[in-house]
Image (cartoon, coloured by chain):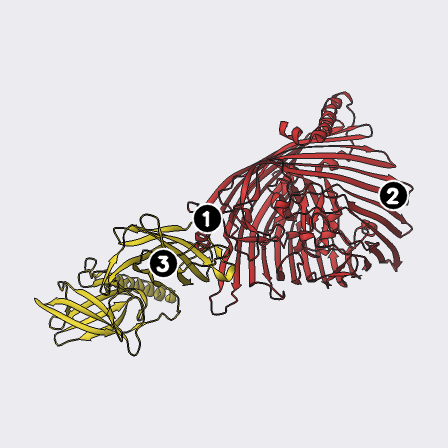
Chain colours: A red, B yellow
Amino acid sequence: MKAFISVFPSRGILMGCLWCTLFCGIFASQIYAQETPVDSLKLIHLNEVIVISAGKQLDHQKQRKPLSTLDEFLESSRSINMVKRGAYAWEPTMNDMASQRLAVTIDGMQIFGACTDKMDPITSYVDVSNLSEAEIGSGQQGAAFGNTIGGGINLKLDKSNFKPTGWSGSLESAFESNNKMRVFGGELNYSDEKFYLNTDGIYRKADNYYAGGDKEVKFSQFEKYNFSINSGYKLSEDKSISATLIYDEANDVGYPALTMDVSLARAVIGSVSFNQDTLLGHFSNWESKVYYNNIKHTMDDTKRPDVPIHMVMPGWSETAGFYSQANFIKEKNHFLFKLDGFYNKSLAEMTMYPADSNEPLMFMLTWPDVRTKDVGFYGEDHIALEKASLKLSSRLAYHSNTVADDFGLNSLKIFYPEMDKTNTRFLKSFSAQYHKMLNDFHFNAGLSYGERAPSVSEGYGFYLFNSFDNHDYIGDPNLNTESSAEANASVTFKKPLFEITAEANYFHIFNYIIGVVDPTLSTMTIGADGVKIYTNLDYAQLFNASLSGRYSISNALKLSGTVSYHRGVDNEGENLPLISPLSYRSALDFYKNQYSASLSVEGAGEQINYNSAYGETKTAAYATLSASFGKRFFINENDLFLKAGIENILDTNYSSYTDWNNIPRMGRNLYLTISYSFN
Amino acid sequence: MKTLKYIFALLILSIAFGSCSEDNDETPMDPNPVEGLNKIYEFPSADHSVEIYSEKTALEVGYNEVSIRIKDMASNKYVTNAEATWMPMMHMETMEHSAPHSMLSNAEESSVYKGYIVFQMPGNDTEYWDVTLNYNMNGQAMTETHQISVQQPADNLNKVQVFMGSDDSRYVLAYVNPTKPQVAINDFQTVLYKMENMMTFRVVENYKITVDPRMPGMGNHSSPNNQDLTYNSATKMYNGNLSLTMTGYWKINLKLLNANGDVLKGEDVTESNPESSLYFELEF
């Protein structure tokens, strides 16, 4: 705590206040003991749920931009920021931590990207058409999905779940002016009390986009399609089986911030699950699932002019896993137990074509066929107290990595002659989260501890080029487990007409893993500035705070806004990279008689705390203005929904702190979406 | 039921047959001492024949391991007490010179005389190599000289260097191992000879050769954990480590230092000096 205060003197005071509120909340709970309101459960359960589902949900029309990419949906969450390397496949970050510190799952399934340069976060292998919502848990609140430091995101698939709706379907299309993106989608569903079948498909194609001032951003095009089927059958009143299959393929994806593009990113994701309402008399909602997914990702630079050397980098990631979970309710204790496990195989290679074609091809394994085994047990107890609740949770996991390929093992032994083929860890997570209601106030506070194993790149990467800081990265198989002690607190004041929330969290991360320059090493990538080795820093500190509010001006008109502050420093007080500057967002939403409209502003302050050692430059402040208009029509009980909007109205040329190499973001963009659904 | 019987019968037969063949395997057979080597020459005489083997399909410029067997035609057996010695010789238009070579030894396998020769140059139409063999045959000393063909390696990669050191001595440095380089830390081995005169080459002891592998096609990328070559008195060769981070074309930049640490040949690789004048080339 001492170090924390020395780094953030003013923030220390703020934290102190938050701690006060926490303890006040605990003691107050004994004094003001009244009935527990029903909604108190939900608030604490997950920090945030973003509704994505197209068509069926009534909320759909209130969304400012239906049929936008999943990335845009996630970005609308107040706890998620997206790192962008182009127009496609943004990487979600939460609490200023990226995918290696997050547990991102699709319907509880572990999936790992196959790209060594993180060009395929797993959120790029599903589309809005597949999903109903994204469950977001900050910090150890996300540990139900896997070992994490920063948090967990679970993308829930859209299923009819034996609702007696019969046949239903929808057709959707959208067009965006800036990059001429065409979107065509549709779904067809049947559901009754014994059986359901959901199918959907979506196709997107976009050309290069134009930044503010009509400047074309070359190599920002993409094309992708996605199909999914999921079905369920009731075996008896309290038993059902269901199965899911998703096929997702993207081709010709340009990455303007990188020197390579993606010719193929393909995922096949499948699962079979069994559900039973009760188990052994005492347990309820027993759900078990086995799953398998297979990802192939191919990067090449064949379409790029003026590259010093042509190369192809294919990667493969295969994961098989299972989980089985059940609830157990005993008086005021609401338990959830979950046993899960997965086996992943990550392999990536690089072939370079020498300028002199008489020379042999240059080949290396950039991921040496790493086999990861993980078996974990998660348990939580949600205790309903009077006008308050307490959630205790823990995850214990066995985690091991093995380098299966001798070529890859020998490659890494160049750097670590004594390294072992297998590395085993035991990962622990504990968390306590307390919620208290006091008149119109909600207090939330939590303390937790979590651990994570290094990612495949951090442990076993071999000359992975990072264009953000222009360095080659080498993994270290002997890295220590990274662990985090976390404190969070929030206060909400809620009245029927308005609501205001202040929240903050602090992470003290021990053995923080980051690339550190080794000046003795020679670069592999032509033009790179140096080589970094993934290293454990003694510790790093991350602090996030936000203030958000909502005000109902009238029944039809609502105003909302969020301001957030982020800070991250290492053990020497140096800034960590990719930490958001002060950012804000505000919107005015109108909804009445099937008409909807919105006006929103989004921006960020100047990035004062940047670190040039990580390739960062000071990103200037910016603000963008957007607006949308929608109308819903009923045609013979069917539903036609039109929405048009304009983003970045002032055609501002800007880039945010997350934009790799400060590639400018999209300029003015008009969009139109039409969706027609029938029942 | 009938078919089941047949299946049983077949099963028993196959087991019996299987065990039979196992018995056959157990009969000891002489392992071929030149297994995996190529017979590149056979020089027949009246009562015996000299066979010359190499790992390569022909003798090449650089380091060549050579195995020699002498077959006694009368007994049809290979001679084990020949006490063979050899002397390679280059016949140029105006002069003659020998080549660095080891003694022949049959310590490993009594019927195979093994050694190596470092050929400094290829033969051509007017200049040629020969090798003179001295050996005992049935108690009689024999001397035979056979012309041999030495070729430039097909990959044209430089694996031997003949140079004048800053001490005004002439040296021959030849690449020995790894013959099959890997993306790994390879055991690196070379031989170093000083040319005393046209006919005499002496193994140089206790010098040092620094190792700096580079990929000229990749902006002169280098690798970590290389180990300089030092003299090993058991093998009479120089041993070190060579790290290769990927397949492709590598230039192994070298620097020769004498026992006092004076540089006799070669330069450091820097931004302005991309290569040393003393180097080997590798492709894999």
Please tell me whether residue A277 is drawn above or below residue B77 in the rendered image.
above
Residue A214 versus residue A299: which sits nearer the camera? A214
Outermost residue toward the bottom in this view:
B125
Q: Position of residue A8 (x, y in %)?
A: 68, 31
Q: Which mark is residue A415?
A: 1
What residue is at 69 percent from the left and 38 percent from the top?
A567
Question: Between marks 2 and 3, how big is the CA–CA gap?
Answer: 74 Å
- What's under tag 1, amino acid-wise? Phe
Residue hosting label 2: A558
Determine whether the residue tagged by mark 1 lies in a helix, strand or loop.
loop
Residue hosting label 3: B178
- Near mark 2 (Cα within 10 A), the count class, few <14, some 14-19 or many ≥20, is some
Question: Between marks 1 and 2, how big is the CA–CA gap?
Answer: 59 Å
- What's under tag 3, amino acid-wise? Pro
Q: Which mark is residue A39?
A: none
Residue A25 versus residue A606: which sits nearer the camera? A606
- What's under tag 2, amino acid-wise? Lys
Question: Between marks 3 and 1, how big is the CA–CA gap?
Answer: 19 Å
